[in-house]
Image (cartoon, grey):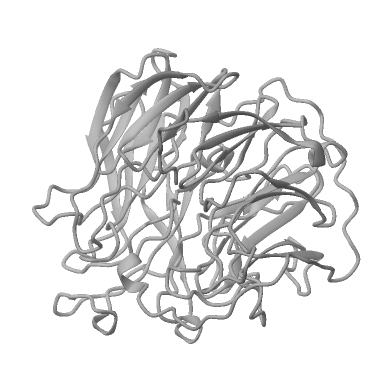
Amino acid sequence: MSKFRRFTRTRTLAGISGLAAVILLSHGAAAAAAGPHAAAPNLDWPAYLHGPQHSSVSPDQAFTTANAGSATQKWHWPPAGQSVVLDASPTVVAGTVYIGAQSGEFYALNAATGAQLWKRALGTNAQGGCGRVRGVSATAAVLPDPVTGTSTVYVSGARNLYALNAATGAVVWKTQIGPTTTTPAAYYNWSSPTVVAGHIYVGLSSECDFPLIRGGVVELDQHTGKVLHTWYTVPQGSIGGSVWSSVLASSTGSDVWVSTGNECSAAFGDTCPPGNQVGNSLSIVHLSASLAFLQAWQVPSSQQCADCDFGSSPTLFGGSGSHSTPPDVGACNKNGDYYALANNPLGTAPLWTAPISQPAMMDFMSCLASAIWDGPTGQLYVAGNAPLGSTTFAGSVQELNPATGSLPPIWQTNLDCAVMGSPSLDSAGVLAVGTYNCFKPPPPGFTPGAYLLDASNGAMLKTLPTGTSRVFAQPVFAEGSLFVATESGGLYDFVP
């Protein structure tokens, strides 16, 4: 996924109460401590949510529950006097950090020093109904070209998907996502590309619903950038169902799953065509590798609410024995519920539903974060906006039972501000989480930030020194460091 979209709909948020200090709430016995995993030779973070299955788990073990409290800044980018707005998460491969900015510039940095290696202008969208110009919001994937073997960066610019030479930034190919339109900002690439088995999948979405477009998923050839297939969420002649999130894929690429956005609604200010159909909006959808429709499950009307669509990218999780074959798929809806379904077939009802957050306060606070699935230990972590019943805390992180999703959670840690972007986990049991908006107005001393938590019990290990900048980008454990991108404070490299 990328970030929240419909800023224009966020207009009446006055009077929301403030926050108090961060506390830890324990719900039931803490899970057994997550033991260190076997060391892996590849400590890269090659794509959004780490890979096509969206585990959000790094093989890196540099940060541990014993040393995380001593984390210090190694470097900060950009240099003093320069500023960047970073909503995309960093990608770290072979000693290089790749990241895009809202200015439309895409950068490659030396992972050891933060020195800029190259940059490439990928453009911005036209200012449309939302009144904001955006450049790169999506996270890049860095993998070898399937034909030449050349390390290549696949990144969603505002309107085009690019393949860049990872060493030089030279454009290998670019492909426009979605049809040409004369309407400013009608289309925008929120979706981070999913690269698997020689194919690339990217969501088709509007910039912020004004205007809505016909949403869907585009499949491209990884080597050439040629569009192979397009699947649409709604029938021809209808609009809605934008795919803000990023596509989930099986390890072989034989199956893909996608979470979809809101339907067209005149009550919400949309201009809907006569006879507009909902189609597969507000759904988790299972597609074949060539985007043939297989099955969809749609949130029941009784559980829908204003602006309650899917912005969270789905995650594969669960399994038996070694947990090596995840059979379930899940995502958080902006109604605050996390839905878990069998991955194939989806079935007609969720395996379980866990209400982990309050319903969306428009796009000011929404459950947009993707879950973390630690396959070797069989642990599932979720995060979201204000926890149920709270008028104080704006965010939380929880560990859920992956088999049942039963509440209360195994543990829950409440935070000052909403967790809008996805957290991440390293293989020594440390969770990294960034926070975004606080309640309005926030009480003194309550600001967004980034934190390290003990994955076994949710205990706070470290508040990272990132100033008061909001953090939407996913923190990334890679190559012995933790990289944290912020909206106004730049990119930080922390080491234990």
| In the image, farthest residue toward the left | 182
Q: Is residue 134 left or right of residue 33?
A: left
Is 361 located above or below residue 291 in the figure? below
Count of picture labels? 0
Q: What residue is drawn where x is 40% and y is 75%?
A: 307
User: Which residue shows up at 43% across the image and 78% down it?
Assistant: 13
Rendered position, 159 above or below 445: above
User: Measured from the top left, where is residue 93 in percent x and y?
Assistant: 55, 23
Residue 98: percent from left, percent from top? 46, 28
Image coordinates for residue 298, horizontal then vertical, percent:
45, 72
Between 75 and 413, which is closer to the camera in this rendering? 75
In screen coordinates, is 149 left or right of 463? Answer: left
Q: Residue at x 39, y 16 (%)?
A: 147
Residue closest to the eye, 262 or 376? 262
Taking the spot 50% from the left edge, 42% from the top edge, the residue there is: 489
Q: Quadrant of the C terminus?
A: top right
Question: 123 or 270, which lies in front?
Answer: 123
Q: Residue 184 in the image: x percent, y percent? A: 15, 55
Q: Can the viewer see residue 146 in this picture?
A: no
Q: Quadrant of residue 416?
A: bottom right
Above/below status of 487 relative to 344: above
In the rendered image, is residue 15 in sight? yes
The answer to which quarter of the image holds residue 175 is: top left
